[in-house]
Image (cartoon, rainbow, N blue to C red):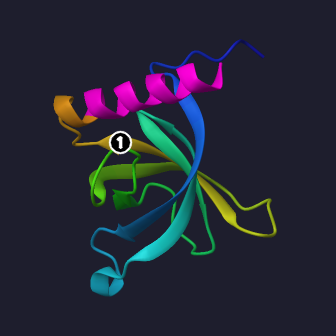
Amino acid sequence: MGSERREFDRVPIPMPVRFRVLGGFLGMWLDGLVQELSAGGVRFTSLEPVDQDATLEFQLTLPGRMGPYAVTGQVLWVDAARPEALEYGAVFINVTDGQRAFIEELVQFLKSRKG
């Protein structure tokens, strides 16, 4: 197995997240917990089942921001192996350069504080 290369640095940052499936039933907001964040996407857990390839609207509660930070993502993978919650990996889509730069700056700041 080769080494994994990522386009963006990521950082473990447990924080609440609200999300909904775009085009989903009634557009209900669901709750989850971010496990890792990068400017390219997010790894999160939730008790709510979401299909792979689903398009989600996220409301992230980011440090240094007042109010939720809205971004759109697509679920790339689902891991149902953990009994306490489903785990998901999502890539951000339709993200502006400004949004990506803000998240990258936050990730770098959090990484510098851990090291």
Report x, y in % for residue 55. Answer: 35, 58
**Vertical relation: 114 (above or below) 83:** above
- In the picture, which quadrant includes the C terminus? top right
**Vertical relation: 85 (above or below) 35:** below
The residue at the point 50 percent across, 72 percent down is 31
- In the picture, which quadrant includes the N terminus? top right
Per the picture, the main secondary structure of the magenta-coloured stretch is helix
Q: In which quarter of the view is residue 112 placed?
A: top right
Three-letter residue code for mark 1: Phe
**Vertical relation: 90 (above or below) 97:** below
The residue at the point 23 percent across, 40 percent down is 95
Q: Is residue 6 magenta?
A: no
Please name whichever residue, 64 or 74, is drawn nearer the observer in this view of the structure: 64
**Vertical relation: 108 (above or below) 22:** above
Left/right placement of residue 89 relative to residue 67 reads: right
The residue at the point 71 percent across, 67 percent down is 85
Q: In this picture, which residue range is highlighted in magenta?
A: 100-115
Left/right placement of residue 93 relative to residue 83 reads: left
Report x, y in % for residue 48. Answer: 57, 75
Report x, y in % for residue 28. Answer: 36, 82
The residue at the point 19 percent across, 29 percent down is 97
Mark 1: secondary structure: strand
Q: Is residue 110 magenta?
A: yes
Please name whichever residue, 113 or 32, is drawn nearer the observer in this view of the structure: 113
Query: Around disc 1, counting alpha carbons within 10 Å, would you say few (fewer than 14), some (14 to 19), or many (20 or more)?
Result: many
Q: Which residue is mark 1?
A: 92
How many numbered marks does the figure carry?
1
Report x, y in % for residue 29. Answer: 38, 77
